[in-house]
Amino acid sequence: AAARRRDHKPCTPDELPAMTLADVEQAHAVSAVEVSKAQRLGQSGLSAAVNQSAAQPVTKLLLASSCDGQEAAFLVRLLLGNTGLQRSVLLRALAHAFALTVPARPCGASATLKSYQNPEARQASVLAMERAVGRAHGEVGGSVERLLAALFANCPPHQFFGQCGPTCGTPLLPMTASWSADLESVLLRFTGSAVLVEEKYKGTRLQIHKKGEVIRFFGLDHKEFPAGENEALLSVARSLQNDC
């Protein structure tokens, strides 16, 4: 498919059909069905017919991709399961999309552009949505369902914390610390703000969730960490029994 895209006659932007996420998802689903069908039939290797059936929807997408090759390269990485994009970049893109458009209703219709009184209002909304989506994703423990539910409900940034706030029993995503070899440049970023510096201790990061008499511990993998015979955790649990 990639070879056919290279040999394909370039199109002008006006002639080029738009590639949508729905098109990519549908092509991926059709290809997966064809491959799964071959595996159920017990074929050790894909036959030419099955191989062609699985590749055909992807080939159509590659032929419809932009002439500069960027869409084709991203599509290939996506199908290989490695987009090369950080999670923060994807969340920022998601926030920008919903800050600039009104979700389609009913589902399947096209989204419409949001109107703003001026460019400053639009920029402020984009930045606010970016912060709200990033924070909400961490506070719901990476739950895509809760995040998308708020976005498709056209929830404004200032209401995100009510829709996607933390809940007891759902571990929060940990913040990732960034390293710097230049202390002065770091302090300059916090000019005018109070800064608290503390020593970093070695050990295991745990989250402690307490609701009534129930106390639960969660590890870095977001899985529950049983106290068991761990005397340190049992001591923490005992000390918290009469708190909050």
Image (cartoon, rainbow, N blue to C red):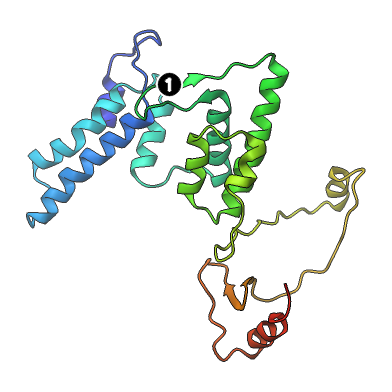
Q: Nearer the viewer, residue 144 or 91?
A: 144
Height in image: 9 above or below 220? above
How crowded pointer 1 is (Cα within 10 Å; few <14, some 14-19, many 20+) is rated as few
Q: Nearer the viewer, residue 73 or 56?
A: 56
Height in image: 132 above or below 227? above
Residue 100 in picture, x, y percent from top left: 56, 24
Which kind of residue does numbered mark 1 sit on? Asp
Q: Which secondary structure, mark 1?
A: loop
Identified at 54% across, 30% down, the residue is 98
* Quarter of the image that includes the N terminus: top left
Identified at 76% across, 53% down, the residue is 180
Residue 193 in picture, x, y percent from top left: 90, 47
Tell me: 242 left or right of 142: right
Tell me: 12 left or right of 155: left
Give the number of marks: 1
Residue 2 in picture, x, y percent from top left: 29, 31
Identified at 61% across, 78% down, the residue is 213
Height in image: 52 above or below 87? above
Identified at 43% across, 21% down, the residue is 68
Tell me: 143 left or right of 216: left
* Quarter of the image that includes the C terminus: bottom right
Disc 1 marks which residue? 68
